[in-house]
Image (spheres, coloured by chain):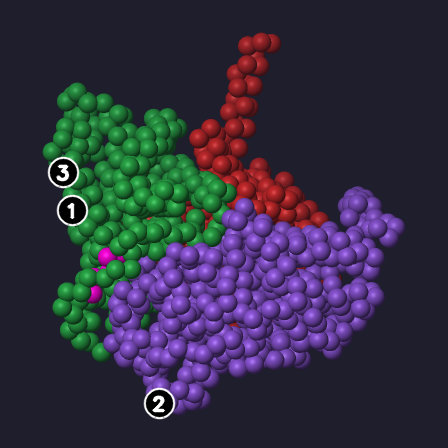
Amino acid sequence: MKIAPFWIVSILLFAAGTYFAATVENQYYFFAGYTILQATIMATAWNILGGFTGYVNFGSAGFFGLGAYTSVALYTAFEPPLIVMIVAAAVVCGLLGLGTGYLTLRLKGVYFAIATLALAIVLETLMINWDYVGGSTGAYIITPERVLFFPTYIGYLFVLMLVLAIAAVAIARYLNSSRVGRGLAAIRDDETAAECAGVPTLKLKLLSTTVMGALMGVAGAPLPFFVTFVEPVSAFNLLVAVNAIAMPMIGGTASWIGPIIGALLLGSVQEWAKVTISSEWNILIVGVVLVGFITLAPRGIVGLVQALRQKARANGPATA
Amino acid sequence: MFTLDLFLNAVVAGVMLGGFYAAVALGLSIVFGQLDIVNIAHPAFIIAGSYVAYMVNNAFGIDPILIGVAFMPVFFLVGVAVYGIYYAGFERTGRESLAGLAFFFGLMFIIEVALILTFGVDYRLVDAPYIGETLHVGVVDIPLRMFVPFVTALVMTGVVYLYLAKTFTGRAILAVSQDRLALRLMGASPVRIKAIAFGIGIATAAVAGALLIIIGPVEPSFGRLYIGRVFAIVIMGGMGSIGGTLIAALMLGVAESFVQTFYGPSWAPLVAFGVLLLTLAFRPQGLFGRL
Amino acid sequence: MSQPSNLGLGRMMLAGIMMIAFAFSPATAQAPSDDPIKIGFSMALTGGLAGNGKAALIAMQIWEKDINEAGGLLGRPVELVYYDDHTNGADVPGIYAKLLDVDKVDLVVSSYGTNLIAPAMPTMIRRKLVFMSLFGLAVNERFNYERYFQIMPAGPHPAEDWSRGFFDIAMKQDPQPQTIALLATDSEFSKNAVAGARGHAERLGLNIVYDNTFPPGTADFSPIVRAVQATNADLIYVGCYPPEAAGIVRAANELDLKAKMFGGGMVGLQYASLQESLGSMLNGIVNYDFWAPEPTLDFPGVKEFLEKYQAEAEAAGVDPLGYYLPPFAYAYLQVLGDAVNAVGSLDQEALAKYIHETTFDTVVGPVKFGENGEWAESRALQVQFQNIKDNDLDQFREAGKTVIVAPEKWASGEVIYPYRE
């Protein structure tokens, strides 16, 4: 997608979102929408390191949870505006991402993935033992009734998430299509060769992990205001991490659009299942869809679409 | 509060716990250590083994370990089948790293949900004559509930180790991770060997599951607690080394036991993962690995 | 509201169409008087608390059937509308938004457990709804919401009242105990319960010789129990969840744990599956409970209710005896239903006022709420397991096995002290 259409669509989305949030009183769709937007940011962030650079992160829940707890810590300290907390979470988790990036010096492939998992568990244990943010007992957040012109608080959160999601996607899109993106792709395809070709692999990997970390922290920062009661087990929960991997894989990891498609699709199905089938089947869906897609459609939906287009092109002229 | 008898007991309890952890990690050590397959669903298979033990023990009163051993062939075949799918979908096409991981993630969820749908979410326990009995050796207490699984785990580890070292297929398994071409030249089919290895890995889950449910109650999402532990053990022990896995498991068990006894149990998981991170940072090949 | 721009005309039309669609959707149709009254809630049907959540749901469905057989509420049939929250607090606000805005339920009640009740509170407070709650510990302490009602009989100061009975018994003994060991799982309820116990210990001048938490997922408790034993504490107060309760009780028996009193806040010892498998290992443990089949708690309706529950429980794979949560799940709907019928309308303010002022007759006995929505008078019981045999589930149906030893008002027997010398 070229620059101008992307920004036009983004602005339209923002306008539509704000409009609905300002007028519609029925809150349920904003709750569902918030969750899907959160998943979109997580999927997009994950894909920067996973799809673009080729390093698998199993510990997405760690970054997400740390972002949420940064908010809780600041809120307990002096209740700053939400924007401040989002920025703080971006900084904190970005630094964590930077640190994780240095890990990649020593670890490749699956070792890196396991290190990220260990990291997530260490973070969770730290939060469980840190009583200032509530520890395992949990922390309560009191949210205001109304913000600005939005009749409901969730409407405000929804629009906030929309803006953050658009920003995250814009960043991913920039990374994907720029020189940086080509460097990342070179690392993904063959890191040693990239080094030999003069690609600054360390710098790019650090950039990749930092951006990923920051975006995941940003996705987690509003969580305390969404649920109003935060405790470590649900903030660091496994489903967040799995979705962060499943959604880009289903959508397609090669481009910035894949995670969005995956998040919209899988997220909507999960939200729908939550209030209809309403039982264990929800988890089953994630498992089956994930397994099905990666077995049958390895390049995700984007890959499927590309393959169909190629077939059409191949068949077209021949039958003309 | 640091007394000799507390110390001795902490060591003994840690060793027994570590032995049990070795049984849990053994299957992964084969599959991940030898074959480089990241079967993150291994703990889920272990829970499935626990439920099998529960079902048969509840219905017929047979000893859980016997049930575990009896079901090893069944689990072996399941393992072979799973490997078949994995191979067809991923290894043959060369996409094992990312897609393979995701495949096993999905598999883990599917197993967990299948268990929930079949058995419900209540905690399940088994009954055996040695649960609740304790040996007293001087100042040291040895609950049989821990001791019997410990001995079983050692036996199983020993059997697997000997199998890998002494039989043709076993040595082929060791070889396939080192040099596939040479293996072919020796007349063994790498794919078949890998399928057998994966099957063995899953077969150990049948017994490990029985041991788990002897030690304590089990419910379907229990496996998630063990994911981190098993990977920590396998990596610390060193990829490709059964002996290394055992030693790493024992070390982890003793470390956890010490922290629980003397410092405060809430820091125990931190110890395990902290050590893992340190290992990865400074000696990624683990203690005995061949990297 | 801002003026819609020209560009927004199309969107306005779309929004308008959507809103009309909502208005005419079946959920909001204005219908004649056989239109059901809908009670909405989320419940933990999967995840960590599902064992209790599913049992609670069965009890609630029995209530639904009973109330409809008796003519419903305000002459209209009652319908329960619920969704699974997967024991995940983050799902709760969205579910209640759906229940209220899309399904248009008339009344709401809570899910089970603090982690699932707390996230719903802001919604309830904002919409000024009566919120009957099922077993959350001290949720209202932060919010002070006057329309919150908690059916768990912890009492006006939940965290302290929970363990008060344990200490009352202990201090009545001669000689009085001097030392106490505190042990808790690293999670919300356990730490809260033990915090209450700590308060009592300090108030009574007991010497706290051990005070630690342990992570959920601990496999072997021998090192921990041994560390506790090494302190030679007179009293041992534990707050934990079911798998740990089983592990601790087993370790206590294997290591021959000696103490004057042992137990306190162990969740899980009330569950049939654990009671059956731990058997005689339970003897002597003094633990909290809320209902037991003892003659002092034989309230009208409870035996009939349990019969209906037990008929369905086995097939559903939940606690076959149902003494812990199900009677209270039935009762919290009883309170709501009685209030609606008495007040004669669904007006939330009138209902809240009525519930505050009235003593209700339920299957768990007389229920009266205090100002903060908790029970005006604590009925947190301490029971002691006595004469338990191994491998016998049916023994728990009789009196004399889970003997109520505190408070005196409801006691059905004497405590056997000490636990073990």
Could you tell me which residue is drawn at 66 percent across and 79 percent down? C370
Q: CA distance from mark 1 to mark 3?
A: 11 Å
Residue holding disc 1: B243
Colour assigned to chain C in the rendering is purple
Q: Is residue B212 among the parts visible in the rendering? A: yes
* Element class at badge 1: helix
Residue extending farthest to the right is: C32
Q: Amino acid at mark 3?
A: Leu
- Establish whether labels 2 and 3 are both on one chain: no
- Establish whether labels 1 and 3 are both on one chain: yes
Q: Amino acid at mark 1?
A: Gly
Colour assigned to chain B in the rendering is green
Tell me which segment is drawn in magenta.
B141-146
Residue holding disc 3: B162
User: Is residue B100 rendered magenta in the image?
Assistant: no
Colour assigned to chain A in the rendering is red
* Element class at badge 3: helix
The C terminus of chain C, quarter of image:
bottom left
Q: Amino acid at mark 2?
A: Pro
The picture quadrant where one finds residue C306 is: bottom right
Residue holding disc 2: C175
Q: Nearer the viewer, mark 2 or mark 3?
A: 2
Q: CA distance from mark 2 to mark 3?
A: 61 Å
Q: Relative to residue C183, is residue A32 depicted above or below?
A: above
Q: Position of residue C82 (x, y in %)?
A: 65, 52
Given the image, what chain letter belongs to the residue carrying mark 2? Answer: C
Q: CA distance from mark 1 to mark 2?
A: 55 Å
Q: Is residue A185 among the parts visible in the rendering? A: no
